[in-house]
Image (spheres, grey):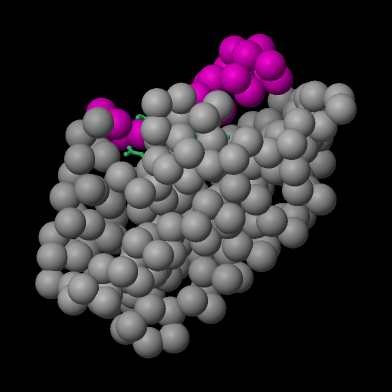
Amino acid sequence: MFAMKLHTREQAPKEGKAEEPKQPAEPFAPTQSDYLQFLVDSKEVYMALEDIVNGNDKLAPFRNSGLERTGALEHDINWMATEFGLERPQCGRAGTTYAEDLRQMIKSDDDIPAFVCHFYNFYFAHMAGGRMIGKQMSKLLLDGEDLEFYKWDENVNELKSRNKEAIENFASSWTREERDRCVNETPNTFKGGGSLNGYLFGGSPH
Ligand code: HEM
């Protein structure tokens, strides 16, 4: 899978090929506010993905996929704000920028393969590395509490394979060029998704 090569060795020890980022002098320790910001920005991006899928009939096969995360995130954001007496922040730069880029992306049907790459990577990253991050944050910041963001209504492996199949079916009629447009978009999905991780690992300004 092309996506795996864009992970660093630390993220994915077996398949990661990307260069490790330079380590800052002091390791970054995220706070509850950083995590809340990450959740707010994540919700903005999921909202964009869900609006686009619901608003474009060509993308109808991806509606009600079971992957949707905005409801769970809204719940978690309210819970965290109340539980820890935090003010709900505005969406930060990372979430606003990525969500807006996605909303502007489909200018014609030619752009659909690139969008599908974002759809796949953003949802699937969350079910892979995202769940590992969730466990770390839960221990570090939430006293072991599990957020709804990391719970799905069905078995995650079944959810993944059903959606992988839906994507394969959708792509089965694509030309060589359309397939290339989808695969070649992968670095941009890491740029967009990775920018949100900056809130937790000290990379992105907010
Ligand atoms: C701190 C950052 C990250 C960590 C620690 C991480 C870690 C991992 C790990 C360990 C896997 C393999 C999991 C498995 O085999 O079940 C994985 C898979 C994957 N990651 Fe990441 N990753 C990170 C960032 C990203 C980003 C930014 C993207 C793209 C937006 C991404 C997209 C994917 C995809 C598409 C898969 C394959 C999922 C699947 O086939 O089920 N990851 N990640």
- Frontmost residue, 39 versus 23: 23
Quadrant containing the N terminus is top left
Q: Position of residue 87 (x, y in %)?
A: 81, 41
Tell whether 7 sits left or right of 197: left
Residue 130 appears in view: no
x and y, in percent, of residue 148 in the image: 49, 31
- Identify which residue is drawn at 66% across, 65% down: 97
Name the residue located 59 percent from the left edge and 40 percent from the top edge: 19
Q: Quadrant of residue 152?
A: top left
Confirm whether the magenta stretch covers residue 7.
no
How far across and down, in percent of the image, does residue 94 sit? 69, 56
Q: Quadrant of residue 157?
A: top left
Please name whichever residue, 145 or 168, is drawn nearer the observer in this view of the structure: 168
- Residue at 76%, 31% in the rendered image: 23
Horizontal placement of 129 versus 109: left or right?
right
**In the figure, residue 133 lies in which quadrant?**
top right
Location of residue 137 with respect to 117 vertically, above or below: above
Between 96 and 111, the one nearer to me in the picture = 111
The magenta region covers 130-156
Is 137 magenta? The answer is yes
Can residue 61 be spotted in the picture?
Answer: yes
Q: Position of residue 171 (x, y in %)?
A: 19, 65
- Identify whether 20 is placed above or below 111: above
Q: Is residue 56 above or below residue 4?
A: below
* Label total for image: 0
